[in-house]
Image: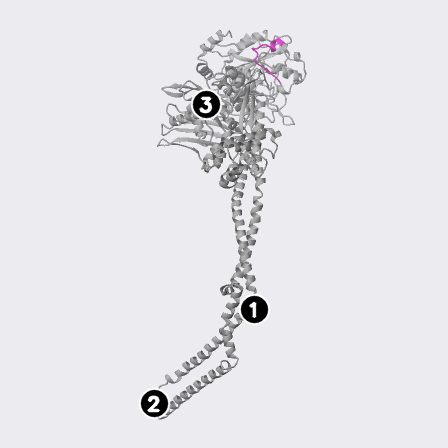
C-alpha cells in the first residue's frame, strides 16, 4: 500500500468499459425504472467497491447512462467512508463508427465534465437524436479519424477533451489465430492518434502474429508496424453485477471479470493519455484475476519511505513521500536539492564515517552539508526506512544545542548502531563518486562489484574470520608447544639423574639397613636408660608427699573426747608412712640394680656399645667408598617421590605435546580453507562480473585478477621488517614487488587456477621456505644484491616470525579493470588501467554497472553530468526504466530525459522563495503543475522548448 501523504503515481485498478442498467438492451440484471434508481445505483456501487476497483469508465451505448450517472456518483460517494477509499468515475459512451464492417469506439471524459457537454460531443461524433430508433442503437456517421479529432481535441488549456479506445467486440479466440485482418482494419490500427485498444487477454498469451503486432518491433509485418506501439487494456464490458461461477471465478461480462492496472497520480484524461503513450511503464494486465494483486504488492525490495527536514538553514521544512520506483528531485541552483540528498545520506549513516569508500570531493560536499544542517540547533532530518521484509524504522539526524549532531533510531535501543547503519542496503552516488569509481588513481570498482554480492561476501568474510581466528589460536599453541617440548627435555634429564641416584643408593642397601638397625638399637638403649631413671624419680616424688604433708592432730590439747587415743593413733599412722617410704626407696633401688645387672653389666654389652657408637663412622666410610653423601641416603625416599612425580609430569607433558602437535598439524588444512575462501571471493566477483557484462549487452568487459593489488600486498609485506639495517631488509620492498609478479605469473600460467594451485603469494613464499624449488629470477634477484635465501628464511622463521604469521593471514586484494566498447561495435574505447577513457566514458561504464543488477535503493546526485546526450536517452533512460521495476531510485537531476522519458513516478520540484529552498510542485508528470515545473526548470520554459523544436524542424 502507498503511504499516507504520497503525491506521486501509483497503481489504480481500472475498468474503463462498464455498462449499467440504463442500457436496457444489453443489461442482463435487474431492470432500471424511475422508482428503483437509487437502490440499483447503490447495489452497483457496492459491487464496484467489492471488486476492488479504483476507477470505472461508464460507457453505455450512445450515452444512455446520462441520467443514471449522477445517481451512481452519489452512491459511490456515500459508500466511500464505509470502504475507506474513493472510486473515480469517468463518464463516457460507446458507439459504432462508420468504418467498413464497422467498429465500436469508446469515448471517456474527465470526471468533472458536464454531462450535457458529453451529450453534445456524442452528437458531434455523428450519433443523432434520438439515440435509439426503432429499437436499435443509432450508429455514428463519422469515421475513426474524425471521431478522434472531436473527442481528443486539444482545448485552450492544453488538455484533451477526452480519450478514445477501440474495444474488442469479437470472440476471445480471435487473438489465438494469426489473421490480423479479422480484428481491425489496417488503416484504423495505424492511426497514431489512436492510443489504446481493448483486448481480452495479456499480449504474452496471444498468438505470435498478434504479439509481434503489439510489440511493433523489427519482426512485425511492415504494413502493420506502428511508429509507436499501441496500448492494450482489458475491461469487463459488464452487463451484470458481480457474479462468480462454480470455480469461484467471475463469470463473463460481470464486474471483476477483466480490468487493467494503470499507474497515475490522480485519475484524469491526461493521466490516461500519458499512460497509454507510455504503457510499458504505466499499464499492467492481470494474468489471472483470482490470484492477481496490486503490482505494488509484488515489489518487496527495500526502500526509503520518506524524508522530512525541519528547521534547516536556507531550507523551508520539507516532507517527501517517495515512490518505491523512480523519484526525481529537480530545481535550480541553491534550491536545496543537495541538502535534501546529503541529509538523507547523513541520517542513514552513509557519510563515510563507518568505513565506506568515499572520494575527497564527495566527503568535502558531505561535510559542507553537515555544517549547513548543524547551523541551527533544532535541525532534524527524519528518514523512514522499510526493509525488504517489511520492517520499518525511522532514523533521526538531530542537531543538539551545542551544534553537534548524532544519529539514532527512534523508539529503539540499538546495541550496535554502527553495524545497523552499515547493514542498511542503500547506496549513494554523487557525481564525484561515479567519476571516482573508475578513476585510474582511486579505483573503487571492486567495491562497487562487491555491493552486488554483499550477502555472499558477508558469509565468506564471517567464515574467513573464523578460520583466521583458529589459525591464530594454533599459532599461539605452537609457542605453547615449544615450551612443552622444552619442559619434556628438562623432565627427561631430571628423571635420568634421579634414577642414577636411586640405583647408586640401591648398592648401599645392606649398609644402610645395618646402620639403620644399629641406630634403632642405640635409640632403644637411650630410651631404656631414660625410662629407668625416670620411673624411680617419679615414684620417689609421688611417695615423698605422704610424709611431707602429714600434720599431727593434737586432739588432747584441743580437748577432744578421748583425745589421748586420737593422738596415739595419729602417731602410728605417721610411722606407717615413714616405713612405706623406706620400702619404696628400697624397691626402686632393687629395680635399678636389676636392670643394670641384666643390660649394662652383661659381658656382651661392651661389644654392642662399641658397634652402636661406631655405626655412623662405619656407614660414612661405606658411603664415601661409593661416592655418596650420607645426606642423600637420608633423602632416598624424597628422591624416590620426586622421581615418581617427575615421571607423572612427563607423562602429562607428553600427552599435552601430542594434543598440541595434533592441533598444529591442522594448520595446512586451515590455510587451505583460508585460501579457498579467498578464491571463493574471487570467483564470486568473476561470476557477478560476467553477469553484469551480459546485462549491459557486453558493452563493458570486467577483468578481475586474483590477489594482484600491489598496495595491499606491499602494506602487508613491508610489516615484516623491524630493523632496516640488514641487507635483506634494505632490499625487502623490491623483493616483494618481484614476489607479487612471480605469483601473478604463476596464477596466469595455471589453467583456471584450480583449487590447490596459486593459493596465495604468502603460501608460495612459505613453500620456498620449506624447500620447494624457487624460480630462477628469485635467486638471481637475491644474488645480484648479495642476499642469500637463508637470510630470508632466518628473517621469516626467526627474527620476524610473529610478523610473518600475521602477514600470512592477510588477504591480498583482487584487482579490477574495465574495458569499455564503443556502441557502434567498432572495438574498445579504452580501459581504466591505462587512463584511456574520458570522464564521460568512465561514467557511462559506471552507471551501466550500477543499474545493471540488484534490488537495493540507489540515490544519485546528477548522474548525467559528463555523459553524452545520446547515452542519456539511448542507454541511461532505458536502464532506469528497467531497474525502477526492481528497485527504488532517487535522482537529483538537471536533465529532462530522466524524469520524463524514464517516467518518474514522483517528481519533487524545488524553487527559491525569500532565500530558502521551497516546494514548487510534486507528483507525476501527469500533473500539470509538475509538467510546468519540468518545462521551466529543465527546458528553460515551454516557449524555449517550442523554439528549439522549430529550429530542429520537429
Instruction: Label 3: state its secondary structure.
Output: helix
Q: Mark 3 and mark 2: span between their CA atoms?
A: 137 Å
Residue range (magenta): 185-199
Report the residue marked by disc 3.
Answer: 432
Which one is closest to the eye, mark 1 or mark 2?
Answer: 1
Q: Mark 1 and mark 3: span between their CA atoms?
A: 99 Å
Q: Position of residue 168 (x, y in %)?
A: 62, 15
Report the residue marked by disc 2.
Answer: 555
How many numbered marks does the figure carry? Answer: 3
Of the pair 830 and 359, the residue shown nearer to us: 830
Counting residues from the start of the chain, the first of labels 1 and 3 encountered is: 3
Residue 262 magenta-drawn?
no
Q: Position of residue 732 (x, y in %)?
A: 49, 34
Of the pair 942 and 435, the residue shown nearer to us: 435
Q: Mark 1 and mark 2: span between their CA atoms?
A: 75 Å
Report the residue marked by disc 1.
Answer: 510
Which one is closest to the eye, mark 1 or mark 3?
Answer: 1
**Mark 2 Cα-neighbour bin, 10 Å: few <14, some 14–19, many ≥20:** some
Examine the image and state in which quarter residue 144 appears.
top right
Amino acid at each position: 500500500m502507498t503511504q499516507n501523504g504520497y503525491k506521486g503515481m501509483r497503481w489504480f485498478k481500472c475498468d474503463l468499459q462498464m455498462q449499467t442498467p440504463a442500457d436496457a438492451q444489453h443489461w442482463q440484471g435487474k431492470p432500471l425504472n424511475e422508482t428503483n434508481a437509487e437502490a440499483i445505483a447503490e447495489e452497483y456501487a457496492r459491487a464496484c467497491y467489492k471488486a476492488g476497483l479504483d476507477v470505472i469508465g461508464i460507457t453505455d451505448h450512445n450515452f444512455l447512462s446520462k441520467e443514471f450517472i449522477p445517481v451512481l456518483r452519489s452512491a459511490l460517494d456515500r459508500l466511500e467512508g464505509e470502504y475507506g477509499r474513493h472510486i473515480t468515475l469517468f463518464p463516457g459512451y460507446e458507439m459504432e463508427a462508420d468504418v467498413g464492417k464497422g467498429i465500436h469506439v469508446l469515448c471517456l471524459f474527465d470526471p468533472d465534465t458536464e454531462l450535457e457537454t458529453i451529450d453534445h460531443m456524442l452528437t458531434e461524433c455523428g450519433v443523432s437524436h434520438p439515440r435509439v430508433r426503432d429499437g436499435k442503437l443509432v450508429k455514428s456517421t463519422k469515421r475513426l479519424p474524425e471521431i478522434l479529432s472531436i473527442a481528443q481535441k486539444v482545448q485552450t488549456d492544453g488538455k484533451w477533451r477526452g480519450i478514445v479506445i477501440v474495444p474488442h467486440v469479437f470472440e476471445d479466440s480471435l487473438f489465438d489465430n494469426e489473421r490480423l485482418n479479422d480484428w481491425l482494419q489496417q488503416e484504423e490500427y495505424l492511426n497514431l492518434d489512436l492510443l489504446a485498444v481493448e483486448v481480452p487477454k495479456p499480449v504474452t498469451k496471444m498468438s505470435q502474429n498478434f504479439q509481434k503486432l503489439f510489440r511493433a518491433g523489427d519482426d512485425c509485418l511492415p504494413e502493420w508496424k506502428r511508429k509507436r506501439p499501441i496500448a492494450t487494456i482489458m475491461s469487463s464490458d459488464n452487463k451484470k453485477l458481480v457474479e462468480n461461477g462454480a470455480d469461484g471465478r467471475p463469470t463473463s461480462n460481470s464486474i471483476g471479470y477483466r480490468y487493467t492496472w494503470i499507474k497515475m497520480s490522480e485519475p484524469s484524461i491526461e493521466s490516461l493519455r500519458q499512460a497509454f503513450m507510455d504503457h510499458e511503464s504505466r499499464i499492467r494486465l492481470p494474468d489471472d484475476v483470482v490470484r492477481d494483486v496490486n503490482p505494488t504488492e509484488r515489489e518487496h525490495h527495500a526502500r526509503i519511505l520518506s524524508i522530512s527536514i525541519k528547521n534547516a538553514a536556507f531550507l523551508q521544512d520539507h516532507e517527501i513521500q517517495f515512490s518505491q520506483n523512480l523519484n526525481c528531485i529537480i530545481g535550480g541552483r541553491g534550491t536545496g536539492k543537495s541538502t535534501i540528498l546529503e541529509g538523507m545520506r547523513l541520517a542513514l549513516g552513509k557519510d563515510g564515517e563507518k568505513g565506506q569508500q568515499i572520494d575527497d570531493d564527495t566527503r568535502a560536499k558531505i561535510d559542507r552539508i553537515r555544517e549547513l544542517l548543524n547551523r541551527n540547533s533544532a535541525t532534524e532530518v527524519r528518514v523512514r526506512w522499510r526493509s525488504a521484509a517489511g520492517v520499518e524504522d525511522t532514523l533521526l539526524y538531530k542537531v543538539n544545542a551545542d551544534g553537534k549532531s548524532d544519529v539514532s533510531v527512534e523508539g529503539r535501543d540499538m546495541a550496535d548502531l554502527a553495524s545497523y547503519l552499515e547493514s542498511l542496503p542503500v547506496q549513494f552516488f554523487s557525481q564525484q563518486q561515479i567519476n571516482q569509481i573508475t578513476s585510474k588513481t582511486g579505483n573503487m570498482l571492486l567495491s562497487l562489484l562487491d555491493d552486488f554480492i554483499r550477502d555472499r561476501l558477508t558469509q565468506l568474510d564471517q567464515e574467513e574470520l573464523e578460520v583466521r581466528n583458529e589459525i591464530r589460536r594454533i599459532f599461539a599453541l605452537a609457542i605453547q608447544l615449544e615450551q612443552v617440548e622444552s619442559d619434556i627435555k628438562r623432565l627427561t634429564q631430571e628423571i635420568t639423574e634421579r634414577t642414577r641416584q636411586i640405583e647408586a643408593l640401591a648398592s648401599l642397601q645392606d649398609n644402610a639397613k645395618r646402620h639403620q638397625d644399629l641406630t634403632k638399637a642405640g635409640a632403644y638403649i637411650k630410651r631404656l636408660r631414660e625410662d629407668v631413671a625416670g620411673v624411680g624419680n617419679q615414684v620417689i616424688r609421688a611417695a615423698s608427699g605422704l610424709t611431707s604433708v602429714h600434720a599431727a592432730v593434737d586432739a588432747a590439747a584441743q580437748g577432744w573426747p578421748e583425745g589421748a587415743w586420737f593422738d596415739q593413733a595419729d602417731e602410728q599412722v605417721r610411722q606407717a608412712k615413714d616405713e612405706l617410704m623406706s620400702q619404696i626407696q628400697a624397691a626402686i633401688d632393687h629395680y635399678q640394680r636389676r636392670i643394670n645387672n641384666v643390660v649394662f653389666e652383661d659381658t656382651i654389652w661392651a661389644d654392642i656399645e662399641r658397634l652402636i657408637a661406631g655405626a655412623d663412622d662405619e656407614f660414612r666410610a661405606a658411603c664415601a667408598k661409593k661416592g655418596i653423601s650420607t645426606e642423600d641416603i637420608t633423602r632416598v625416599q624424597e628422591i624416590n617421590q620426586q622421581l615418581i612425580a617427575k615421571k607423572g609430569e612427563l607423562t602429562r607433558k607428553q600427552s599435552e605435546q601430542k594434543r598440541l602437535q595434533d592441533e598444529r598439524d591442522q594448520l595446512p588444512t586451515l590455510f587451505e580453507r583460508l585460501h579457498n575462501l579467498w578464491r571463493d571471493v574471487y570467483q564470486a566477483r568473476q561470476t557477478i562480473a560476467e553477469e553484469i557484462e551480459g546485462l549491459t549487452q557486453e558493452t563493458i568487459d570486467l577483468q578481475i585478477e586474483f590477489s594482484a593489488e600491489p598496495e595491499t600486498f606491499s602494506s602487508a609485506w613491508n610489516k615484516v621488517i623491524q630493523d632496516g639495517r640488514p641487507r635483506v631488509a634494505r632490499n625487502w620492498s623490491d623483493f616483494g614487488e618481484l614476489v607479487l609478479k612471480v605469483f601473478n605469473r604463476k596464477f596466469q600460467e595455471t589453467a583456471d587456477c584450480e583449487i590447490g594451485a596459486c593459493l596465495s603469494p604468502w603460501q608460495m613464499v612459505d613453500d620456498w621456505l620449506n624447500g620447494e624449488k624457487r624460480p630462477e629470477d628469485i635467486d638471481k634477484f637475491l644474488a645480484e644484491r648479495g642476499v642469500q635465501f637463508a637470510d630470508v628464511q632466518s628473517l621469516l622463521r626467526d627474527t620476524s616470525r610473529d610478523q610473518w604469521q600475521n602477514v600470512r593471514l592477510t588477504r591480498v586484494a583482487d584487482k579490477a579493470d574495465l574495458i569499455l566498447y564503443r556502441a557502434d561495435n567498432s572495438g574498445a574505447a579504452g580501459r581504466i588501467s591505462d587512463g584511456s577513457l574520458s570522464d564521460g566514458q568512465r561514467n557511462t561504464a559506471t552507471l551501466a554497472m550500477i543499474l545493471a543488477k540488484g534490488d537495493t535503493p540507489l540515490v544519485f546526485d546528477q548522474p548525467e553530468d559528463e555523459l553524452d546526450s545520446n547515452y542519456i536517452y539511448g542507454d541511461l533512460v532505458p536502464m532506469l526504466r528497467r531497474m525502477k521495476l526492481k528497485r527504488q531510485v532517487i535522482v537529483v537531476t538537471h536533465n529532462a530525459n530522466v524524469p520524463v522519458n524514464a517516467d518518474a513516478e514522483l517528481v519533487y520540484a524545488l524553487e527559491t522563495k525569500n532565500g530558502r529552498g521551497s516546494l514548487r510542485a510534486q507528483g507525476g508528470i501527469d500533473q500539470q503543475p509538475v509538467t510546468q515545473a519540468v518545462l521551466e526548470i529543465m527546458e528553460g520554459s515551454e516557449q524555449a522548448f517550442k523554439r528549439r523544436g522549430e529550429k530542429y524542424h520537429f
